[in-house]
Image (cartoon, grey):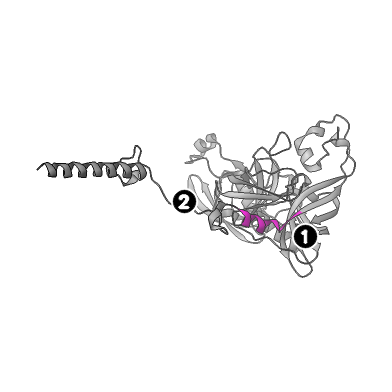
Amino acid sequence: MRRLWIIFAEFVTVTLALVFVVTLIRPDWNPWRKNVVEIRETAAPGVLLNVANPGNVRLTYSDAAKKAMISVVNVSSSRTVAALPAGHPLSNDPLFRRFFNPPEDQDDPAQSEPQASLGSGVIVNADDKGGYVLTNDHVVSSSTDIKISFADGRVMMAKVVGSDPDSDLAVLRVEGKGLTPITFGQSEKAAVGDVVLAVGDPFGVGQTVTMGIVSALGRNRLGINAYENFIQTDAAINPGNSGGALVDVNGNLIGINSVIYSRTGGSLGIGFAIPVSMAKDVMEQIIANGSVTRGFVGIGPQDITPELVESLGLSAARGALVSSVGRSSPADKAGLKLGDVIIAIDEKAIQDSKAAMTVIASLKPGAEAKFKIIRSQKEMTVNVTIGKRPKQLRQNIKE
């Protein structure tokens, strides 16, 4: 009997020892273990990994950077800046500095001599004789002797095919072989939080890649361009990055870096890029025609305010109010009236007057567009034949 008790005691001791060891090493095997907080876990999201060396797996975007860098170039040119009187209020104006880029060591930027303008560009097309480079209009406007420096060290002269100040885009032509055009992505599928890379030549130090995320989409009302639909990013963009590429994690182009918000001239994490969907349309028109033709219907759009929501009996502050209609304009001929609220154009939702202007401008002259409107608290559709936007309307609010 005593022998059985000894065997039982040894068995219990060994069992408790095993439970203690297992609980210490693999607590998840413990059937009595309970989580303090119940959480929902999922497999790690898909990320770009360099697994060339399985023993040294690391998170990297090197493949995307290499794919884009070969298609991004440095753009340099000579520019003469018109002199302003000493002490003129524009001398220290940020917008003046953006377009005229005075040297840092110059006391009065308004009195500058002929100077170099630096920016970036993206190779968008190549053939047997050369190719086209897309950049910002403010990089090459009023410039001469435009030079393109490639990632492989080659330098070529370029000429301006055409430019569009309203969208701040320009297309250059270079003659030479061995150009590698970038792959276009789908900016309309970009989402806030997507990782992006900015590729360019900041301050002329050489090709540089920075990383960030998409901070916001559809940014407008910045007062920079006539037509604004910017992608906002916190990827570091500095002077010299203008005209460079904003790419996704696969190295595909989703935007043309254009401008930064900064009180110091350096990156503060607020940069803006022109979506490639807009840039592509402008680029194709410039290459085909040397200029850009935009749609026109002849209305003056106005934002919907809370007061208008109440007075018009609307359900929400969305759409663009028709505040004026040009006589004999496409809108007038189609039957659009004062007080109509445009809520969609060709099934594209219209949130405000800026959105209405942008969508109308993108329409092709001669095409018929369906304007979904609210009139007397009732939804209806008006078919409008799009006209050609007159050049003199560049400073006019009518679209």
The location of residue 316, given as percent across then percent down, is 49, 41
On-image quarter of the N terminus: top left
What label sits on residue 290 in the rendered view? 1
Residue 176 lies in the magenta stretch: no
Residue at 17 percent of width and 45 percent of height: 7
Q: CA distance from mark 2 to mark 1?
A: 49 Å
Residue at 79 percent of width and 43 percent of height: 99
Q: Nearer the viewer, mark 2 or mark 1?
A: 2
The amino acid at mark 1 is: Gly
What label sits on residue 373 in the rendered view? none
- Taking the image as drawn, is residue 364 in sight? yes
Q: Give the image quarter of residue 57.
A: bottom right
Residue 72 lies in the magenta stretch: yes
Give the answer, above or below, for where 85 lies relative to 119.
above
Q: Which residue is mark 2?
A: 44
Front in this rendered view, residue 126 or 332: 126
Q: Give the image quarter of residue 370.
A: bottom right
